C-alpha cells in the first residue's frame, strides 16, 4: 500500500503534470509540423525542382516478389510487400520536419528567455586584498 501512496504523491507533483501536458502538446505540434512539411513545403520544393515528389523517391535494394502486382514506383506498396528499400525521399521529409521543429522550439525558448527576469547580481564584496589590508591595519592599531 505504501507504493500506491508514493505513486499518488509522484503523480500529484507539478513537474510530472507539466511534463505530461508538454508531451501531449509536443505530439500535437509535431503533427502540425509534419503537415506543414508534407502538404506545403515539400510540394513547393517539388514545384521548384520540376515536379519532383520527394516522398516517393527511393532505391530498391531487394528483389520485388513475383506475386507483387502493384506499381513499381509506389514506395508505400513496395515497402508493404516486404521489398528492401532505401527511402531517401522519406528521410529528407523527416530531416525537414526536424529542422522546422527545432527552429520553432529555438524561437520559443529564445522568446521565453527574453521574458524571464534577469537575475540581479549580488553586490560585490571586498576583495581579498581589501580584507587583508583591513586585517593588517587592525593589527597595527593594537
Image (cartoon, rainbow, N blue to C red):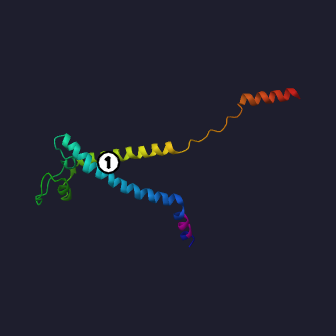
x and y percentages locating residue 62 in the rendered image: 17, 51
**Quadrant of res 23:** bottom left
Query: Looking at this view, is 19 or 114 the one in front?
Result: 114
Asked if the stretch drawn in magenta spans residue 7, the answer is: yes
Relative horizontal placement of residue 100, taking residue 5 as reference (left or right): left
Q: What residue would you read off at disc 1?
A: 97
x and y percentages locating residue 110 in the rendered image: 45, 42
Q: From where the camera sits, is residue 88 visible?
A: no
> Neighbour class for label 1 at 10 Å: few (<14), some, many (≥20)?
many
Q: Residue furthest front?
A: 115
For the record, the magenta segment spans: 5-9
- Locate residue 130 relative to residue 75 in the image: left or right: right
Quarter placement of the N terminus: bottom right
Q: Residue at image x 20%, y 59%?
A: 80
Residue 78 in the image: above or below residue 9: above
Does residue 77 belong to the magenta stretch? no
| Residue at x-position 52% and y-position 57% | 15
Q: Position of residue 137 (x, y in %)?
A: 82, 27
Identify which residue is drawn at 33% across, 55% down. Answer: 31
Q: What secondary structure do most residues of the magenta stretch adopt?
A: helix
Kindly tell me whether residue 37 is visible in this rendering. yes
Q: Residue furthest bottom?
A: 1
Nearest the viewer among 57 and 21 is 21
Whether residue 26 sits left or right of residue 62 in the image: it is right
Please name the residue shown 56% across and 41% down the image. 118
Q: Position of residue 90 (x, y in %)?
A: 25, 49
Amino acid at each position: 500500500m505504501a507504493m500506491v501512496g508514493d505513486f499518488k504523491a509522484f503523480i500529484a507533483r507539478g513537474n510530472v503534470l507539466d511534463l505530461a501536458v508538454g508531451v501531449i502538446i509536443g505530439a500535437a505540434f509535431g503533427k502540425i509540423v509534419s503537415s506543414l512539411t508534407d502538404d506545403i513545403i515539400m510540394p513547393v520544393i517539388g514545384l521548384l525542382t520540376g515536379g519532383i515528389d520527394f516522398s516517393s523517391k527511393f532505391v530498391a535494394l531487394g528483389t520485388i516478389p513475383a506475386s507483387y502486382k502493384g506499381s513499381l514506383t509506389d514506395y508505400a506498396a513496395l515497402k508493404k510487400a516486404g521489398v528492401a528499400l532505401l527511402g531517401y525521399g522519406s528521410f529528407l521529409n523527416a530531416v525537414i520536419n526536424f529542422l522546422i521543429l527545432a527552429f520553432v522550439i529555438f524561437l520559443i525558448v529564445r522568446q521565453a528567455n527574453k521574458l524571464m527576469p534577469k537575475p540581479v547580481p549580488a553586490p560585490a564584496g571586498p576583495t581579498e586584498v581589501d580584507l587583508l589590508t583591513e586585517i593588517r591595519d587592525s593589527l597595527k592599531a593594537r
